[in-house]
Image: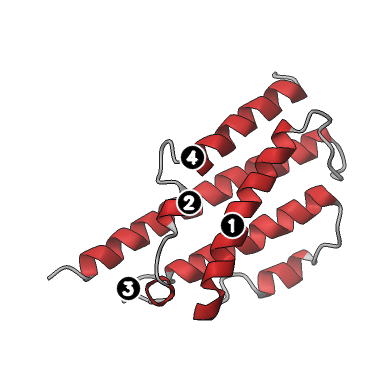
Amino acid sequence: MPNVVEQRAGLALVFRQIIEGWDIPAPEGMLKIKKDSANLQLPGLPYSIATNLAHAVLWQDFWLEKLKGGKQKSGMEQWEHDFDVPEPHQWNELRSRFGAGLREAMEYCTDSEFRHSSLNDEDALETLARIAVHGSYHLGQINLLKRTLRTRNRP
């Protein structure tokens, strides 16, 4: 089993791949969508791009707060707002928070002292892996939703 330093290096590479768009489009480019399009609810699909991103940000913030040792909402409070439909004016903030959160998570992986407030290093590594997997999962969904929007708008 890799040691903590090796695991952190592996996670740093994963975050770099997500942020730079090695295997899926980079979040910065993918999320360049007008707020009206991002909030459009297409027939037959469970949620809009904005709702999907708001969900991803909600959980990313929750896990980052765990790493920081800040006051966390209870799991029940968190679930009460899962998949809330954001207002169109929230779109730019959601995009910024998502990107900033990915970069913050990557910093935990590259910090020479691995400072965190989790119970232990293994818990912190698990939390970072969760942020990476969950974020990339939702980026994939957002990419598909964005493609669907483009197809819908073709003549």
Q: Residues within 10 Å of mark 4 (few under 14, many from 20)?
A: some
- Give the numbered dot on residue 142: none
Residue 155 lies in what quarter of the image?
Answer: bottom left
Q: Residues within 10 Å of mark 1 (few under 14, many from 20)?
A: many
Q: Can residue 50 be seen at all in this image of the molecule?
A: yes
Check disc 3 and give the amino acid type. Answer: Gly
Q: Is residue 140 left or right of residue 2?
A: left
Check disc 2 and give the amino acid type. Answer: Pro
Compared with residue 138, is residue 74 higher up or lower down, i.e. above or below?
A: below
Q: Which residue is mark 1?
A: 98
Check disc 4 and give the amino acid type. Answer: Glu
- Give the numbered dot on residue 27: 2
Alpha carbon of mark 2 to alpha carbon of mark 4: how far? 8 Å
- If you read the primary sequence from the N terminus, does the residue marked by circle 2 or circle 1 appear first? 2
- Of the two numbered discs 3 and 4 in the rendering, the one whose residue sits closer to the viewer: 4
Q: Secondary structure at mark 4?
A: helix
- Verify CB contact (< 8 Å) between mark 3 and mark 4: no
Q: Is residue 62 left or right of residue 88?
A: right
- If you read the primary sequence from the N terminus, does the residue marked by circle 2 or circle 4 appear first? 4
Residue at 58% of width from left, 38% of height from top?
A: 15
- Give the numbered dot on residue 20: 4
Alpha carbon of mark 3 to alpha carbon of mark 2: how far? 25 Å
- If you read the primary sequence from the N terminus, does the residue marked by circle 3 or circle 2 appear first? 2
